Amino acid sequence: MATIPPVTRLSTRLIRILGFNPSPMTLQGTNTYLIGSGTRRILLDAGDPDVPDYISHLKQVILDEKVIIGDIIVSHWHHDHIGGVDDVLNAIDNNESCRVWKFRRTDAPEPTLENTVCCELKNGQKFEIDGATLEVLHTPGHTTDHIVLLLHEDNSLFSGDCILGEGTTVFEDLYEYIKSLCIIKNTKPTVIYPGHGNVITDPIDRINHYINHRNEREAQILAVLQSNPNVEFKEMDIVKVIYKNTPENLWMAAAYNVNHHLRKLTIERKIIHEHDAWKYVHSASL
């Protein structure tokens, strides 16, 4: 795992500023991206709240580049992407003119910001600034409001939490998530800039890996149930079998993903759900 520096110039139109919020779920921290080559730029995501090191490095980049942040685009509602927005707005001189953009949630109220109200992103919406044309693609699954950004100039893609620089991600809806991976794959990105982890230089291989990984996990889960017909399993029972080589501090996240596979298999009538558990019965199989 290559170390991600606090600030990295990735191209003439792109600077990555690390969020300084490492954790098992955020890896080395949230990647935020300052996009564009002119004096007015776009910031993608803002990390966690109350992280002085992040704000310090962001302010230094703004000073060194002699730029302003005209827009902040939030990839989705999770706190490590939207939580730092108020701190960023407090740190910049043009906070009253800086717009914050986010796709609307369909499953819960929107997060509340102290200093502004988010403008609503739309699927297919474009942002044009010096050096960059960004297109918004709605990619639900990780969350209902998740979006990725396609940078038209070099057909690169900012994947948020749909695809990570290492490992796999969690999701709220597996069916929608797989559809979103296919949307990303169809853009044929040249490179992927993830919300966590290092730059992905083999994007199509990585997307295929994600899709194949989910299919393989589903087959493993189904095999556990099929080998124990009429035995009731809870998520953690299955995790202890198929994730036995995964560190235990990640088992809760694994159980979350297993739950979504089980829900999908139940919809497909390959297993049944009763007594708050799942089991395979021959009559449930298609």
Image (cartoon, rainbow, N blue to C red):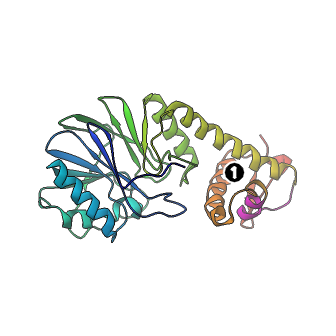
Label 1: few (<14), some or many (≥20) within 10 Å? Answer: some
Asked where in the image residue 58 lies, by quadrant, the reply is bottom left
Residue 94 placement: quadrant: bottom left
Any part of residue 116 in sight: no
Instruction: Using the image, determine if residue 68 lies above or below residue 188.
Output: below
Q: Is residue 231 magenta?
A: yes
The C terminus is located in which quarter?
top right
- Left or right: 223 as drawn, with respect to 63: right
Q: Nearer the viewer, residue 265 or 129?
A: 129
Which amino acid, mark 1? Thr
User: Looking at the image, which residue is at 76% across and 61% down?
Assistant: 240
Residue 31 x/y as whole percent: 39, 52
Q: Position of residue 207 (x, y in %)?
A: 54, 36
According to the image, label 1 marks what residue?
266
Rendered location of residue 273, percent (x, y): 73, 58
At a point 46% along the width and 50% down the height, the residue shown is: 161
Side of 268 where 181 appears, left or right: left
Q: From this view, report whether residue 235 is shown above or below residue 152.
A: below
Image label count: 1
Q: Is residue 4 above or below residue 183?
A: below
Nearest to the observer: residue 232 or residue 171: 171
Observer-nearest residue: 167 or 276?
167
User: Range of the magenta residues?
Assistant: 230-240
